[in-house]
Image (cartoon, grey):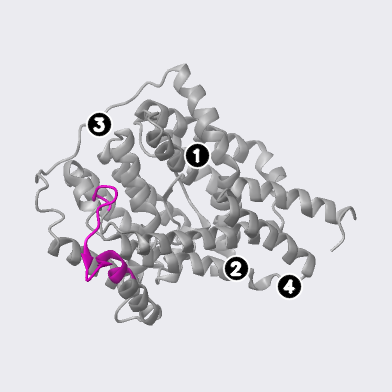
Amino acid sequence: MEIRGFKFNRLEFAGSLGDLGVLLPLAVGLIAITGLNATVVLTSVGLLYIATGLYYRLPVPVQPLKVVAAVTIAAAIGKTKITPEVMGATGITFGALLLILAWTGLLKKLETLFTKPVIRGIQVGLGLLLAIGGIKYIAEPRLFLSAPEGHAIALWGVPVNLIIGIIAATAALFLLSSVRFPAALVLVVGGIIIGLLFGVWRNAPFSIGPEPVQVVAPSAKDFITALFVLVIPQFPLSLGNAIIGMSDTACTLFGKNDLTKRSSSRSFATSMGIANIAVGIFAGMPMCHGAGGLAAHYRFGARTGGSNLMIGAVFVILGLVFGRVSLALLTIIPYGVLGALLLYAGLELTGTIKDVTDPKDLFVVFLIIGIALATTNMAIAFFVGIIVEALMKRGKVII
């Protein structure tokens, strides 16, 4: 079915599930570790999906801020808890900075630093990191997100999650181009069935309704912590991947046309800025778009904003109707299935390198990729790539 350019079919719905390998583990981790309100997190994800689908009319992704999530989870491991108030301050600060960049012209000036080889290096580096993350999920001994650390279910000495992950990745390989049996839909449905068979939800208290929602009032200390611990480390990655990289990836996948004219860096910075300020007021999960997420939705079949409307509705229902039991619902899909989704999403993003042929440009691309893989820090890779490219242009470095 197609309504005014929005398609609603199996492929669009399957494509809408393609980015769950990134979204679910980070969202579940932030809810569990920081005590974020599940209703706020899930509903805000759903509403942003719907809003971006209606405006951009493309399968624009909604993701947690990856550096923010990583730092928050690492802080918890080190016994330093990031509070919901700090998370709220992070959303407000991050959103405000994005709006300032978008509406003062500063973003346009920063874009000059993001040349094609720099953008391709970021895209391919991120794609490989996502693919590696997917392989790690498949190799994870635990079967589910809710399982305690070190817990494994084995069959003849082989972790069941590894078996499921290999089967899921193989099935996805053969179904990537299938219209009748879309890969992501088959994997997610299969993962839910496995979760039910293993009784993941058996002991979860069933309760209908949202969690109580309230406005938070971060202190000055919360804003300072948010700025220096979470926002500043996140910013370079968001500029390169979620804003400038997103605009470039949209044009690469969908071509330069009237539809992708809306997919400008300024538009993405604005939508992320407004969303994060709104979410920050309720101490929700700071969010962004992402070139990897767009590639994931596209890889598994999404081509229009209809996919956003469908997955957005699912998250809104999860937040408002099942908010109190959402953690149990979100952890029902095995690691191996999420890993297969993440693996192919990352590989799709690596394909953007095909239009880079100049040896000097390729040197910068692979330099960024190498640093990204070695450090897992896209910000460091980005800065080194920019510096080396500038030196090459001035003749200081000859390749």
The image quadrant of residue 143 is bottom left
Label 4: few (<14), some (14–19) or many (≥20) C-alpha neighbours in 10 Å: few
Label 3 sits on what residue type?
Val
Q: Please state which amino acid type lies under the numbered disc 2.
A: Thr
Tell me how far mark 2 sits from mark 1, CA to CA.
27 Å
The answer to whether marks 2 and 3 mark residues whose Cβ atoms lie closer than 8 Å is no
User: How much space separates mark 3 and mark 4, taking CA atoms?
Assistant: 52 Å
Direction from residue 147 to residue 299 in the image, left or right: right
Q: Name the amino acid, label 1.
A: Gly
Q: Quadrant of the N terminus?
A: bottom left
Provide the residue designation for mark 3.
213
SS at mark 2 in the image: helix
Residue 311 position, x and y percent, is 31, 58
Is residue 105 found left or right of 317 in the rendered image? right
Pointer 4: what residue? 357
Gap between marks 2 and 4, in whole Å?
A: 12 Å
Rendered location of residue 197, percent (x, y): 13, 64
- Looking at the rendered structure, the secondary structure element under dot 4 is loop
Q: Is disc 3 placed on a helix, strand or loop?
A: loop
**Furthest-front residue in view?**
157
Bounds of the magenta segment: 145-165
User: Quarter of the image containing the C terminus?
Assistant: bottom right
Near-viewer residue (79 or 286)? 79
Badge 1 crowding class, 10 Å Cα cut-off, few under 14, some 14 to 19, many 20 or more, is many
Answer with mark 2 or mark 4, whichever residue precedes in sequence: 2
- Label located before the other in sequence (2 or 1): 1
Q: Does the magenta stretch include residue 112?
A: no
Q: Name the residue under label 1.
A: 273
Q: Which of 163 and 124 is in front in this view?
A: 163
Q: Which residue is drawn at 48% across and 23% down?
A: 223
Asked whether residue 258 appears in the rendered view, the answer is no
According to the picture, the residue beneath numbered tag 2 turns out to be 352
